Amino acid sequence: MPTISHIIHEIEEFAPPIYQEPYDNARLITGNKDWDCTGALLSLDCTEAIVDEAIEKGCNLIVAHHPIVFTGLKSLTGKNYVERTVIKAIKNDIALYASHTNLDNMWHGVNKKIAEKIGLKNTRVLKPKQQTLSQLQTFVPVEHADTVRKALFAAGAGEIGNYSSCSFNSEGNGTFLGNDEAQPTYGKKGSLQTERETKIEVILPVHLQQSVVAALKKAHPYEEVAYYVVPLNNVNQEIGSGLIGELEQPMHEQAFLQHIKTVFNCDCLRHTQLLNKQVNTVAVCGGVGSFLLPNAIAKNADVYVSADFKYHEFFDADGNIVIADIGHFESEQFTPEIFHEIITKKYGNFAVHFSELKTNPIKTL
C-alpha cells in the first residue's frame, strides 16, 4: 500500500510545485504524508460533500485541482464552507491535496486534456514562461567528460524541445593547488597542477537543479567539483499558460461551437459575434482565461475557448477572434482524469475513485 507521500510524489513529478503561480496554494493542506493511503478520491473541487464521499468510499486522500484553502485561515469555527470542509477532513483523518496552477502550466497538463477532448493536433504552449530554465557549466578531465555528460543527461539535463542529450563542449587547461587536507585525483597536494579539461554546458529546467547537481557530483572524479548554475530568461516551450493547436479538419464556426458545447456538456455557452469563417486554429485555457486573449489573437487563433470572461472583456475580441466561454467547471472538469492517469500508471492495483458529485456551484435554467 502506498503512503500519501508516494501518491504526492508521483503527481509532483508530473507537475512540480515550483511552477505554481505566486498566489496559489498547491500542496498537502491537511493530513500526514506518512499515512498509508487507503484510497484516493479525485475531484475538481473539495467540499464537505466530497469529504463525505471519501469517507463512504474508504479513501483517506482527496486529490483536487482547486485548493480548498487559498489564503491563511485565522480561525476554524465552521463559519463558512472552507472551514467546515477542513474541520471535517481533520476530524476524519482525511488528507486534502491540491495540484492547481502548476498543473495548468504544464504542457501535458490541464490544457492538453482540453485540447485532446476538442481534437486539436500540433499543440504548443500559448504563452511560454520565462525564468524556468538554467544553464549548468562544469569542468571535467577530458577522459571523464563522456561519463559526466551521460550522468547529466540521465538526470534530465540537456533536453531542448524534441531533442535530448544536448550540450556544448570546449577544451582548455584547468589549474588547481591542493592544500595539506586535499586528496587530489590528479597531481600532488602542495603542487600546482595543470589538467586538460572539457567545459560542458547544458540547459536544465529549474525543478531538476538539485538532482542534476547531485548527479554531477556523483559522476565527477574530482574531490571538489567546479560548476556554475546560471538562471536564464529563455522562454520554456513546455511550461506556460494556455495551449494552441489545429483541428484535424476545419469546421464552420457554428458547427465548432456546437461541437465544444457537446464535448463539455455545457448548459450555457457564451460567445462573441461570429465572423463567418472556417475554424482551423484554436486556443484554449482552462478556468479564468481573459489574460491570454491578446496571445490568442497574436497567434492568429480563430476561436479562443476558455471561461470566466467579464462583460467588458468580450469587447476585446474586436472582430479578430471568436471568444467561446464554456464555464469554469466545464473547462476543467476532465482534470481528475490526469490525476487518475498519473496514479494508476505507478500503482495499477491501488483504489482510485472519480468523485460521483458534480461540484459546479453555477446552475442554469
Image: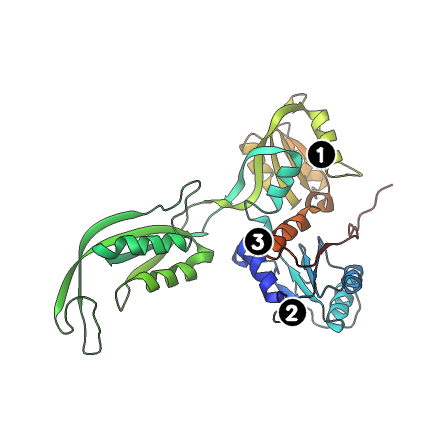
Q: How far apart are marks 3 and 2 (CA)?
A: 25 Å
The residue under label 1 is which amino acid type?
Ile
The residue under label 3 is which amino acid type?
Asn
Determine crowd level at label 3: few under 14, some 14-19, many 20+ residues with C-alpha closer than 10 A: many
Query: Residue 71 at what x, y percent from top left?
Result: 66, 64
Residue 173 appears anywhere in the view: yes
The residue under label 2 is which amino acid type?
Asp
- Work out whether residue 280 or residue 61 is closer to the camera in this orientation and state it: 61
User: Tag 1, which secondary structure?
Assistant: helix
Q: In this view, does 295 lie to the left or right of 207?
A: right
- Work out whether residue 338 or residue 125 is closer to the camera in this orientation and state it: 338
Q: In this view, does 295 lie to the left or right of 318?
A: left
User: Tag 2, which secondary structure?
Assistant: loop
**On residue 110, which mark appears?**
none
**Measuring 45% from the left and 45% from the top, which residue is drawn there?**
235
Query: Residue 96 at what x, y percent from top left?
Result: 68, 64
Which residue corresponds to mark 2? 36
Quadrant of the drawing holding the C terminus = top right
Which residue corresponds to mark 1? 260
Q: Which of marks 3 and 2 is nearer the N terminus?
A: 2
Determine crowd level at label 2: few under 14, some 14-19, many 20+ residues with C-alpha closer than 10 A: some
Which residue corresponds to mark 3? 102
